[in-house]
Image (tube, rainbow, N blue to C red):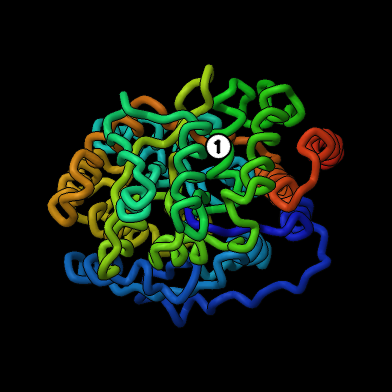
Amino acid sequence: MMDYRLGRRGFLTGMLGVSSLPLLGSFTAAAQDQKLRVFGWGDGTYYKGLFDAFEKVSGEKISFEGVPFSDLQNTILQRFRTGDSGIDVFLVDPTYIPTFSKLGILADLTSAFGEKTKDKLFPSDIQGANYNGKMLTMPMEESTQVLFFNKGLLAKAGVEAPGISPDARMTWDKVIELAKKAQAAGAETGFGFEQVDRYYQLQVLPESLGGGPGVKGDDLLTVDVANDAWLQAGKWYGSIFADGVASRAPTKSQEMRDLFKAGRLAFLVGGPWNIAEFNKVDGLHYAAAPHPYFAGGKAVTPSESFHLGMAADTKNVDQALKFLNYAGVDKDGAVVAAGGSGLSANIGATQDILSRIPQQNPDLKGIDTLMQYELANTAIRRPRTLGYLQLEELVTRAWSDIRNGNDAAQTFTQLQSELERSFKRIKD
């Protein structure tokens, strides 16, 4: 998943109906009757290939409206509070499905796609699109994470390049050991996480140690972020910044990517969407290895990405269903929707995408097999809890505090109390 955050105040405003923020004006539906109105982030450039392809095969026209990435979820909540959202289809982070379901803003897709998606989409993605017995979104994208490394920096340090087979998976301690050697030989920074302190990327640290996702119980509203595994993971995370093998200075995903592209970073944990960007850099000789794990723990990797939702108040049902079918169920459409080297929730599309990556860069031979293995064996998903927005915001802030030198035990103990207070509002 790409990098964004939603303010806790913004979430509570939408969830609890507290009118402390101005409502955004909605589109005039009559003015857009001939176009499918799609809502997402940015200016639509990222999905332009999908829009163009859909218009070509269907004859339908698309009108896109976007907001800054960080404002996406809060804006969606507010647009539907107006009574006329002016939206037909919108991007949905699947962790927010419980929230959107409670607010009644997602159309039920069960009859249209419940059977049609079987054997077409990854079962875990279908499961993630279902809530309370209904299919509420169309899975579109998928994700995983690998350990990218700069071949030149490792060779300069006399470090043998890691293998790409799942059997060659390294522990976190081994990766940091090699990163320090690369740094001693001239690398500016030894190691980094692409998404620095985000829940999506760092959930795997306590999960590898058996600590769970931070919530538990049938309703996933019992907070559990101060167990021994979370504390151990937090202590390790803080140590790599205290040692200087990881830098506190880059705080954004693009900054981490730029550091790697400039040949100044030895190891980067990041997503496959980076491959197309990295391949364009002259002189960047890089390869990939399996995502690390904690010794004595299990291998786990982040997964999932954006779905598409059909607005419950749309008047353009047929157009919307055609678009969802093209982007999710139709293999050719799903390949386009994934964009570049991104992955798809469509099984056939992901197989096609992965098969092309080693052809584009021989140094990535075997990465297709690796990512297929991760999706099938080590992938974990973020919890489907009504408290996810608070969980993501506050856990991310806690990781950031630890990165900047705060004690992990104190930080996670405080986080436990803060999340319990926040979740109590939902339970009540």
Residue 16, position as x, y percentages in the image? 78, 51
Label 1 SS: loop
Residue in view at x 28 percent, y 43 percent: 346
Specify the farthest residue to the left: 359
Q: Residue at image x 39%, y 58%?
A: 317
Q: Which of 271 and 124 is in front in this view?
A: 271
Q: Where is residue 348 in the image (x, y as percent from the top left)?
A: 20, 41
Which residue is at a point 60% across and 56% down the rendered structure image? 247
The x and y percentages for residue 79 are 62, 66
Residue placed most toward the observer, 231 or 114: 231
For residue 171, side relative to residue 417 (left or right): left
Along the horizontal axis of the image, is 58 left or right of 243? left
Residue type at mark 1: give it.
Arg
**Residue farthest to the top?**
296
* Residue 428 place in picture, x, y as percent: 85, 35
**Near-viewer residue (181 or 426):** 181
Q: Looking at this rendering, what residue extends furthest in the bottom direction?
A: 31
* Mark 1: few/some/many CA within 10 Å (<14, 14-19, 20+): some
**Residue that badge 1 annotates:** 382
- Position of 281 relative to 150 (above/below): below
Residue 72, image quadrant = bottom right
Q: Is residue 321 visible?
A: no
